[in-house]
Amino acid sequence: MSAAAPIRAELLRSRRLLARVERGAALLRRKREALVRELFPLARPAAQARREIADAAMAAYRAELEALAIHGEGGVAATAWPPRALSAEVTIQRVWGVAAPRLEQLPDFDRGLAARATAPGPTGPALFEAANRFERLAEVLVDAASRELHVRSLGEALARTSRQLQTLEQRVAPGLRARIAAIATALDEREREEHARLRRIRATRR
């Protein structure tokens, strides 16, 4: 911070500014605590979702390899038809002004043979199993994406709030306290010099 003139008005201004900084720091601490309370219960489900993705992906690709071995690439590709449009509703949850998107009403990925427009005979159990596994993987991925969006938004807000609080507590507030102490010391020294000058003046008039 720049050097301040050692006058009483600057002392009062610096004290008011310090009070505002301390109130701001207290508000940021409450915001950080609220974000931690919101984020902590989501951490374990998010980690569990990653494990579910890994398990679902492993099962899906194993099923695909078996289907490829039996029906070939063309037979496996045919099970992806007909294409379909899927949609999900996005809602915004606000925590201390932080917008955290969440996916609601996730689409239903499961399809039977009729929905895929494939006959049971030519399709075979290996293709049906591979398709089911990949639909399960898609469901897990979309559900995890909802959690990840929520966790990421809260995590970024928590990191930003912590940086702001650290700046106020470790840089701005100490600088203001040092300025206040320097101005108060200068004013006290000036007051002592003024008293000494007045005593000398009175002594010369006697």
Image (tube, rainbow, N blue to C red):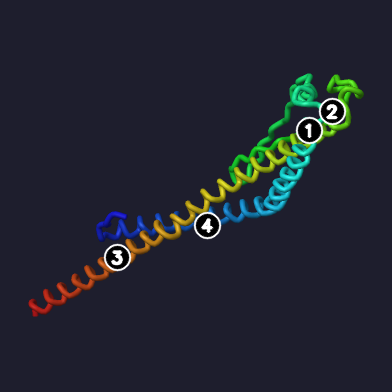
- Residue 136 position, x and y percent, is 79, 36
Q: Earlier in the sequence, mark 2 or mark 4?
A: 4
Name the residue tied to disc 4.
26
Left or right of 138 in this view: 34: left
**Residue at mark 4 to residue at mark 3: CA–CA distance:** 25 Å
Under circle 2, the secondary element is loop
Identified by mark 4, the residue type is Ala
Crowd band around label 4 with a 10 angstrom C-alpha radius: few (<14), some (14–19), many (20+): some
Q: What kind of residue is marked 3?
A: Ala
Where is residue 118? Give x, y as percent: 86, 21
Numbered disc in front, either 1 or 4: 1
Characterize the local packing of mark 2: few (<14), some (14-19) or many (20 or more) Cα atoms within 10 angstroms: few
As drawn, the label of residue 111 is 2
Q: CA distance from mark 2 to mark 4?
A: 53 Å
Q: Residue at x 28, y 54 (%)?
A: 2
Residue drawn at x 65%, y 51% as measured from the top left:
39
Q: Which residue is mark 1?
A: 135
Q: Earlier in the sequence, mark 1 or mark 3?
A: 1
Residue 182 got which mark? 3
Task: Identify which amino acid the numbered label 2 is placed on.
Answer: Arg
Residue 65 in the figure: left or right of residue 145: right
Query: Is the residue 60 above or below the residue 151 in the image?
Result: above
Q: Residues within 10 Å of mark 3 (few under 14, many from 20)?
A: some
Q: Is residue 169 above or below residue 74?
A: below
**How much space separates mark 2 and mark 3, taking CA atoms?**
75 Å
Q: CA distance from mark 1 to mark 3?
A: 69 Å
- Label 1 crowding class (10 Å Cα cut-off): few <14, some 14-19, many 20+? some
Q: In the rendering, at what x and y percent does residue 109 appear?
A: 80, 31
Dot 1 or dot 4, earlier in sequence: 4
